[in-house]
Amino acid sequence: MSAIRMTAMQSLLALALSVMNAGPLEAEPLIDARDPIVLRDIIARYGTAFLMIDIHGDPLIEGRIDGQQFRVHFHECVDGADCKMLGFRRSWVRPELTLERINRWNNERLFGVATLDPGGASTIGLDVNLDHGVTQANFTETVETWRRLLTEFAAYAEGPTG
């Protein structure tokens, strides 16, 4: 066996042994909608966030990011706990936001569904499934996405009607 081949085999053996002795990787703990305080604290990094209870007894976060008020509704809860989903929401009453403009918004974006009710109130929403948990980094990115949606939709709602 050549010296090069022997050195290569020794290197591979050393690598294999080091991987075997490395031990298990530590996974980042997951967070979910069963702990609204953790979620509130992450949201509060972007502005204000207050944990409340809604009329159904489920958690509710009321907050403000970049001057925009919003709510985070907890869904699929059992007796006000063990929630699985979140719904970020912000509403406006802007007569210039027609159904055509709402549809244009929805067709041009991947995240943030806009709706228009018969009374003329428009709502931007972002639904999030946390049933099996996500990393803190993932939820932080979700809040950052929500912050961008709030800013973009506010500008869209108040912008030209064209």
Image (cartoon, rainbow, N blue to C red):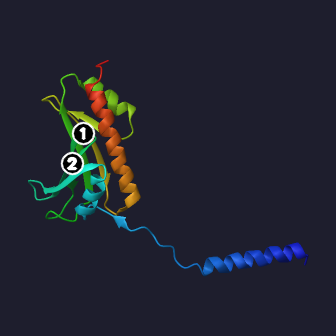
Q: Secondary structure at mark 1?
A: loop
* 10 Å crowding of disc 2: few (<14), some (14-19), many (20+): many
Which residue is pictured at 26% across the width and 28% down the height? 157
Which residue is pictured at 39% across the width and 31% down the height? 108
Q: Position of residue 140 (x, y in %)?
A: 36, 54
Q: Is residue 30 above or below residue 123?
A: below
Q: Position of residue 18 (x, y in %)?
A: 65, 78
Is residue 112 in sight in this rendering? no
Q: Is residue 37 above or below residue 86?
A: below
Which residue is pictured at 12% across the width and 29% down the height? 119
* 10 Å crowding of disc 1: few (<14), some (14-19), many (20+): few
Q: Which mark is residue 67?
A: 1
Quarter of the image for the N terminus: give it. Answer: bottom right
The Cα–Cα distance between marks 2 and 1, rounded to whole angstroms, is 10 Å
Q: Which mark is residue 63?
A: 2
Of 93 and 63, nearer the camera is: 63
Left or right of 34 in this view: 17:
right
Tag 2–tag 1 contact (CB < 8 Å): no
Please identify the residue farthest to the left as the structure is shown: 55
Q: Position of residue 38 (x, y in %)?
A: 27, 62
Q: Secondary structure at mark 2?
A: strand
Q: Position of residue 33 (x, y in %)?
A: 26, 61
Left or right of 30 in this view: 21:
right
Of 49 and 92, nearer the camera is: 49
Is residue 107 in sight in this rendering? yes
Give the amino acid type for the residue marked by disc 1 in the picture.
Answer: Gly
Give the amino acid type for the residue marked by disc 2 in the picture.
Answer: Gly
Quarter of the image for the C terminus: give it. Answer: top left
